[in-house]
């Protein structure tokens, strides 16, 4: 099994050299006197050609073979592969191992259902596109190590078995065999520990950290995931974001050879919501939200009276495609955002049409034409109600039209910071105040005065990096003043007993000279997904879970032996539930 090189190490410069290669049979073509084999290794494919003088064993797809021979120029080059101008004229071929007929096609394009791909993930990972994703992931990690090390960061591992603390999602709990009835939690992030490292004097820390959150899954979310976790001392927000821009620029250059234009735009949260209906806006297309409340100040339509917000978007040249079915779909979308409905009007033959037109005065109709520069075949979609429902609804609709109409240019990247997030959120139903990010986020100095009178007015030194409409990372300046931290806990309704139980060791540490510090985490999986050009996060994780948080390959999660449960003093009831 001597191997002299990987397949794609070879090119025209190697013509005439004798080489030995090894890999999997991707495809074979038998022309009687000649046998052509596409041999695949991790680097790519090369063609092996054998004539009748070569003693050939039985060879099928996915057999592992070794081939020895001379490199030659191909008479019919294949410019779709890296080695397409050359081939190896074999003088010896050996079968290293055989393979059954695979249940999935081992190629970039496969017809296998996702659960089949996950069940046979070890075969799915042979597909070149999957290996490309893993290579991008590797390059991101190597660039991160290099860049942060050059900037005097130190890598520190933090505990996987830790204390359960409220961080926004449900914890995965691990029962203790030694301390019956007590539990560790798997970390949702290393947040508390990395802040403690700043108190410990490390000044610049990073870690490529495993994190765990027990929450409902979707295409870009997994129960266990990886983040590039970073924390620094003695940097203000501008200094920190500039340093992180340097990292993201290096990552783009080293992985896909893309030059990111710096500095990145910084878009205030309020402007992002007002204009794009999202705190992770995709700004590569020009559909924007517009405030139309002033237009309807004298409306007789009950649904527009006494509401917090009335906003609208215009979509060009789709009136002829906006059927009753489409309007029903938009109405259903509104209900997902707890809004009663949505108003759609169309401009056709210099007239407004649609069931909502009867509620519009002539003045309102004219104002809409002027506001949006309406042309024939345009539509206007209007939503009214709570601001925090209206904006996300129209944000979702603008994305729907961008995809349907092909408004987003392929292979383009839109990077920006969203900054100045609210420090708190108020539940629409019960009025409860919660942290928008986490309770250690530092409030804006000029907004501290609102902590007693109206906490919802307080903005924070929080920031997210957004790429193509995905939140690719986020963080904040941290609270380092004990009094401010105590005040934040009070606003959140935590008693002294709650604080001591949930954050006691952390709060105690604040008494010993806490430096001003800032940090963030990039989502490694999501960043790989964006750079790899897929919209499915499971594509870029070697062994992911499906949408049911299960692993079709291993069968996890699954039952365990009774003696294991007995060791933990755990009994299982209501199994059917």
Image (spheres, grey):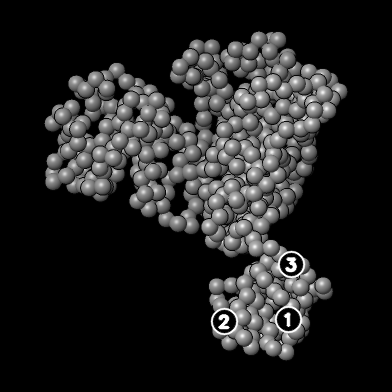
Looking at the image, residue 532 lies above or below residue 477: below
Mark with earlier residue (1, 2): 1
The label number, if any, that marks residue 289 in the structure image: none
Give the mark toward the camera: 1 or 2: 1
Residue at the image point whose x is 16% and y is 35% from the top: 366
Task: Classify the position of the C terminus by image quarter.
Answer: top right
Residue highlighted by disc 3 = 98
Residue at the image point whose x is 26% and y is 36% from the top: 344
Front-lying residue, 331 or 513: 331
Residue 305 quadrant: top left
Q: Is residue 313 visible?
A: yes
**Which residue in the rendered view is the most extreme toward the right?**
178
Front-lying residue, 242 or 253: 253
Secondary structure at numbered mark 2: loop
Q: Is residue 196 visible?
A: no
Q: Residues within 10 Å of mark 1 (few under 14, many from 20)?
A: some
Q: Residues within 10 Å of mark 2 (few under 14, many from 20)?
A: few
Task: Classify the position of the N terminus by image quarter.
Answer: bottom right
| Residue 531 position within the rendered picture, expressed as x and y whole percent measured from the top left | 57, 53
Horizontally, is 236 left or right of 152 in the view? left
Residue highlighted by disc 1 = 56
Looking at the image, residue 226 lies above or below residue 331: below
Disc 1 from disc 3: Cα separation: 14 Å
Instruction: Give the total of numbered labels.
Output: 3
Mark with earlier residue (3, 2): 2
Disc 3 from disc 2: Cα separation: 29 Å
Residue highlighted by disc 2 = 77
């Amino acid at each position: 099994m001597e191997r002299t090189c990987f397949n794609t190490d070879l090119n025209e410069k190697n013509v005439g050299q004798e080489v030995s290669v090894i890999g999997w049979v991707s495809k074979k073509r038998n022309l009687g006197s000649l046998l052509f084999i596409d041999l695949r290794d991790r680097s790519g494919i090369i063609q092996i050609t054998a004539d009748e003088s070569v003693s050939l064993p039985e060879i099928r797809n996915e057999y592992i073979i070794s081939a020895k021979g001379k490199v030659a120029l191909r008479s019919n080059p294949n410019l779709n592969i890296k080695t397409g101008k050359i081939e190896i004229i074999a003088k010896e071929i050996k079968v290293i191992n055989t393979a059954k007929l695979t249940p999935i096609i081992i190629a970039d394009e496969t017809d296998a259902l996702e659960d089949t791909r996950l069940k046979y993930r070890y075969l799915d990972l042979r597909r070149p596109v999957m290996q490309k994703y893993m290579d991008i992931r590797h390059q991101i990690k190597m660039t991160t190590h290099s860049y942060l090390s050059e900037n005097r960061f130190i890598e520190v591992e933090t505990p996987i078995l830790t204390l359960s603390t409220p961080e926004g999602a449900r914890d995965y709990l691990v029962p203790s065999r030694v301390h019956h009835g007590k539990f560790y939690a798997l970390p949702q992030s290393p947040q508390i520990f990395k802040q403690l490292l700043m108190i410990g004097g490390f000044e610049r820390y990073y870690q490529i950290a495993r994190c765990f959150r027990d929450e409902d899954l979707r295409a870009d979310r997994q129960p266990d995931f990886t983040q590039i976790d970073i924390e620094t001392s003695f940097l203000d927000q501008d200094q920190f974001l500039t340093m992180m821009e340097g990292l993201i620029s290096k990552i783009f250059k080293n992985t896909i050879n893309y030059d990111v234009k710096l500095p990145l735009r910084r878009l205030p949260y309020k402007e992002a919501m007002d204009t794009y209906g999202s705190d992770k806006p995709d700004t590569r297309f020009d559909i924007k939200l517009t405030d139309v409340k002033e237009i309807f100040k004298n409306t007789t339509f009950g649904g527009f009276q006494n509401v917090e917000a009335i906003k609208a978007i215009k979509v060009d040249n789709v009136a002829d495609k906006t059927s009753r079915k489409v309007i029903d779909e938009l109405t259903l979308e509104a209900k997902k955002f707890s809004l009663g409905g949505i108003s759609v009007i169309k401009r056709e033959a210099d007239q407004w049409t649609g069931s909502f037109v009867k509620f519009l005065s002539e003045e309102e109709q004219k104002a809409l034409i002027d506001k949006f520069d309406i042309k024939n075949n345009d539509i206007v979609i209007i939503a009214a109600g709570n601001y925090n429902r209206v904006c996300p609804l129209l944000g979702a609709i603008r994305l729907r039209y961008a995809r349907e109409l092909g408004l987003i240019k392929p292979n383009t990247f839109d990077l920006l910071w969203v900054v100045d997030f609210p420090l708190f959120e108020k539940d629409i139903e019960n009025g409860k105040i919660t942290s928008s990010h986490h309770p250690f986020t530092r409030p804006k100095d000029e907004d501290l005065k609102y902590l007693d009178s109206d906490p919802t007015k307080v903005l924070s030194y929080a920031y997210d990096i957004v790429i193509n409409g995905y939140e690719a990372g986020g963080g904040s300046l941290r609270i380092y003043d004990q009094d401010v931290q105590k005040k934040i806990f009070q606003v959140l309704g935590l008693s002294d007993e709650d604080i001591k139980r949930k954050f006691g060791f952390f709060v105690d540490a604040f008494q010993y000279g806490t430096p001003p510090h800032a940090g963030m985490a990039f989502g490694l999986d999501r960043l790989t997904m964006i750079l790899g050009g897929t919209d499915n996060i499971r594509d870029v994780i070697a062994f992911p879970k499906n949408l049911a948080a299960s692993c079709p390959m291993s069968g996890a999660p699954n039952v365990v032996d009774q003696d294991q449960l007995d060791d933990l003093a755990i009994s299982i009831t209501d199994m059917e539930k």
